[in-house]
């Protein structure tokens, strides 16, 4: 497909200048959350003879109404363009690997390097269109109509009326390819994990180099446990487990492994930095929980969703309601990706999602043909790489030609004259199929239909569901490979065909439950079930999900107010203190402390472990927080002194060590050296007191305070907003309750619905969010009395 030129429409200078920092605005300051939403405006459109009504509420949220799906999604595209045209523009540049074309090379050639990675790991235009053509007609109609509506807005609006970042010039029209590539990148951002095998191999090699083969392997098994039984889980059920214990290849089978691991690490950090700068989410994780009628005060179901996607202005998500042609839902969506809510509620049900962290990428090593560097050894013979050349246009300089290689496994991420490293994705060529599942979520009328839709999601997500009939459900989705016998998913594999995947695990083998006996399901990107090993994540006892699970377990019956309170507590709890305060104080009591250290320990003891700034002085309120953080840092450094320069100094390992039976400490953790835990904890506190006293000269210990952390909203356009106190919570939050007679739902999406700084809805939710308030989440704006 012939690529359209961008620079003949929008100049590099004005696009780049649009991202330069400018003074922030304070924004609207709503005094209280309204209990009812007014209809602020109504716009009528016509598409193919069908009337479209776009009604906006008092927070600017559009509700789109039409009788045909083509007209409905045309209206959704138009409404999105009204709110987030500039954000959508940035998204398609990032997703298409065209950042250097518009913004130049960037610092350290980061934009060009990012474009290369996007194209290397992604699809050609022809491949993306093949995925699109395989979609059901109703999904294809949805996307093409959405794009038509987006383009109608571009065509009909005067240039001067467009967002200020466009500086009076119109952007190019959107194509199906633009949205497909945004979808693919978003699906991968939230549903793809794995591919870190070379990092783990480097860790194993360092540990064995330091401690010897046997002791180093023992250290690896403790530092990076394959399945830690003490980790919190979402479901207390068992599932089919076919991951085998593995033999391990010698390091010489993976030449340059550490070099490639560092390259991939740099690429990952570059992607996170650049994508955050240009409006893509930084995947910090997400939390969610759902409670069944047997455990709620109202006798109905309760659900909270909190996708954690980073903070920007405008933020990554926008809100939309769609009504008609078999759809009746409201929730959050992504600009440019498509017209339907990805998290939200329908008439009688609600749903949310978190990243699943299933291991869906494996790294394989290939041997290069010494006589022909364009070939690799596979199944007994030399095989040609697939090779194409990508042309990266660079504003202000010449184009860059980059060769992209693929093997039978997938994209080649490193290649020299001897070896290549290539990565296989279990969802390769299927990312766009996720849209079928999300469309079907919005069309579902019961839990079984929702479950059927979840089967269609190829990437790794946790889905939580509730409905008016009293059902709750949980599913982890994704395609888990059946790996060859003798392989270990934590480490790279041989790419010569001897360790090829044997297939994909059936959906039925994944952890899932409808109305589980435990009465609730909570997830904060944690292990889904006790036997789960399909991950590269190190799930252990200090995982943050423990906090939410403990809160729910402490309540006999969960109320609406409890849902709000748990969210607030989780947002402000110091998770290190939650995991380590008790054990540190216990060990310190037995160590014999100086008077000053004993006083410091008392301040830690009375600190409630929350991070608040009630007096608004830009410092956290309790000295116990300051002392604890310094103390834990000292203990960690001493316990892990033997692991310096090797990695593996995790909170989970520290937890296990501090709780270990002293009689078995040397046998299990001998690689850490001789550990006198009581002395380490005592001396760590004494050192903290000395260090903090020096830093806070002439100050009483009670005012050894720590400066507050802030949520700084990454500025994507012409205007920014002020920061707020840091909270570990969803970028978007929703709470939904269904009882037999009514439904109640609220949400919040800071800083606001609109990306236009001149809109009253550019920054009218930020203060509500900072104050832990919510706005009504109305299913149908024009029929608000309908629950």
Image (spheres, helix red, strand yellow):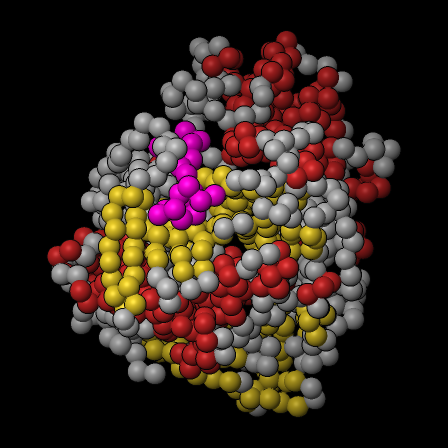
Q: Is residue 8 above or below residue 536?
A: below
Quarter of the figure with residue 422:
bottom right
Q: Is residue 184 above or below residue 344?
A: below
Question: At 43% across and 26% down in the image, what residue appears?
Answer: 707
Question: At 78% across and 69% down in the image, what residue appears?
Answer: 486
Q: Check if residue 731 falls in the magenta segment.
A: no
Nearest the viewer among 294 and 631 is 294
Residue 751, how many percent across, how many down? 34, 41
Quarter of the figure with residue 512:
bottom right
Q: Is residue 557 above or below residue 500?
A: above
Residue 469, how many percent across, how many down? 62, 47
Residue 345, how many percent across, how many down? 49, 50
The outermost residue toward the right is 663
Q: Check if residue 780 falls in the magenta segment.
A: yes
Quarter of the figure with residue 401:
bottom left
Nearest the viewer among 541 and 420 is 541
Let me know if residue 397 appears in the view. Answer: no
Nearest the viewer among 183 and 104 is 183
Q: Image quadrant for the N terminus?
A: bottom left
- Say left or right for 173 vs 533: left
Residue 488, how many percent across, how many down? 73, 64
Residue segment shown in magenta: 767-787
């Amino acid at each position: 497909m012939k690529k359209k030129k961008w620079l003949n429409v929008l100049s590099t200078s004005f696009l780049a200048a649009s991202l330069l920092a400018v003074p922030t605005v304070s924004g609207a300051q709503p005094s209280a959350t309204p209990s009812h939403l007014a209809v602020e405006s109504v716009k009528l459109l016509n598409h193919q003879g069908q009337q479209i009504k776009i009604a906006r509420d008092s927070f600017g949220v559009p509700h789109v109404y039409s009788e045909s799906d083509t007209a409905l999604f045309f209206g959704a595209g138009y409404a999105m363009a009204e709110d987030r045209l500039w954000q959508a523009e940035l998204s398609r540049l990032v997703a298409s690997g065209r950042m250097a074309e518009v913004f130049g090379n960037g610092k350290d050639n980061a934009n060009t390097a990012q474009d290369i990675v996007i194209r290397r790991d992604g699809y050609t235009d022809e491949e993306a269109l093949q995925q699109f053509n395989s979609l059901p007609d109703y999904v294809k109609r949805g996307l093409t109509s959405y794009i038509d509506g987006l383009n109608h807005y571009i065509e009909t609006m005067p240039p001067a009326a467009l967002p200020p970042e466009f500086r009076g010039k119109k952007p190019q029209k959107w194509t199906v390819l633009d949205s497909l590539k945004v979808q693919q990148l978003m699906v991968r951002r939230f549903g793809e994990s794995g591919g870190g095998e070379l990092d783990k191999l480097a860790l194993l090699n360092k540990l064995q180099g330091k401690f010897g083969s046997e002791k180093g392997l023992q250290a690896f098994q403790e530092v990076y446990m394959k399945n830690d039984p003490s980790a919190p889980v979402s479901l207390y059920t068992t599932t089919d487990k076919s991951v085998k214990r593995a033999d391990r290849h010698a390091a010489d089978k993976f030449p340059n492994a550490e070099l490639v691991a560092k390259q991939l690490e740099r690429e990952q950090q570059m992607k996170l930095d650049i994508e955050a700068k240009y409006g893509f989410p930084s995947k910090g994780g997400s939390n969610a929980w759902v409670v069944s009628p047997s455990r709620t005060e109202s006798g109905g179901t309760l659900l909270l969703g909190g996708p954690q996607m980073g903070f920007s202005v405008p933020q990554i998500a926008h809100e939309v309601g769609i009504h008609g042609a078999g759809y009746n839902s409201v929730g959050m969506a992504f600009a440019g990706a498509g017209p339907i809510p990805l998290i939200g509620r329908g008439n009688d049900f609600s749903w949310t999602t978190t990243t699943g962290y299933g291991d869906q990428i494996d790294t394989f090593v290939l041997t290069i043909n010494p006589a022909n560097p364009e070939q690799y050894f596979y199944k007994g013979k030399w095989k040609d790489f697939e090779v194409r050349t990508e042309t990266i246009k660079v504003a202000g300089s010449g184009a860059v030609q980059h060769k992209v290689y693929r093997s039978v496994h997938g994209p080649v991420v490193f290649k020299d004259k001897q070896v290549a490293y290539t990565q296989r994705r279990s969802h390769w060529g299927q990312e766009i199929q996720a849209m079928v599942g999300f469309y079907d979520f919005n069309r579902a009328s019961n839990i079984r239909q929702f479950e059927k839709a979840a089967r269609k999601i190829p990437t790794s997500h946790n889905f939580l569901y509730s409905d008016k009939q009293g059902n709750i459900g949980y599913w982890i989705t994704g395609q888990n490979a059946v790996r060859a016998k003798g392989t270990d998913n934590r480490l790279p594999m041989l790419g010569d065909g001897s360790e090829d995947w044997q297939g994909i695990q059936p959906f039925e083998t994944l952890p899932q439950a409808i109305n589980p006996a435990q009465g609730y399901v909570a997830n904060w990107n944690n292990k889904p079930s006790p036997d789960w090993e399909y991950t590269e994540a190190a799930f252990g006892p200090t995982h943050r999900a423990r906090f939410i699970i403990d809160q729910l377990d402490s309540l006999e019956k969960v109320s609406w107010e409890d849902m709000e309170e748990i969210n607030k507590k989780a947002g402000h709890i110091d998770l290190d203190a939650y995991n380590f305060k008790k054990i540190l104080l216990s060990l310190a009591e037995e160590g014999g402390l100086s008077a000053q250290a004993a006083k410091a320990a008392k301040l830690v003891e009375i600190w409630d472990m929350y991070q608040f700034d009630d007096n608004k002085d830009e410092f956290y309120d309790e000295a116990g927080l300051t002392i604890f953080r310094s103390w834990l840092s000292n203990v960690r450094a001493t316990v892990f002194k033997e692991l310096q320069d090797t990695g593996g100094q995790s909170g989970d390992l520290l937890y296990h060590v501090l709780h270990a039976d002293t009689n078995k400490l040397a046998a299990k953790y001998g690689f850490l050296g001789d550990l006198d835990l009581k002395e380490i904890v005592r001396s760590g506190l004494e050192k903290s007191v000395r260090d903090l006293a020096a830093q806070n000269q002439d100050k009483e210990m009670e005012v050894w305070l720590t400066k507050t952390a802030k949520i700084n909203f990454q500025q994507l356009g012409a205007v920014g907003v002020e920061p707020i106190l840091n909270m570990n919570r969803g970028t978007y939050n929703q709470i939904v309750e269904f009882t037999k007679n009514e439904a109640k739902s609220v949400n919040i999406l800071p800083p606001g619905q609109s990306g236009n700084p001149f809109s009253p809805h550019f920054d009218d939710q930020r203060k509500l969010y900072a104050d832990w308030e919510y706005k009504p989440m109305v299913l149908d704006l024009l029929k608000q009395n309908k629950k």
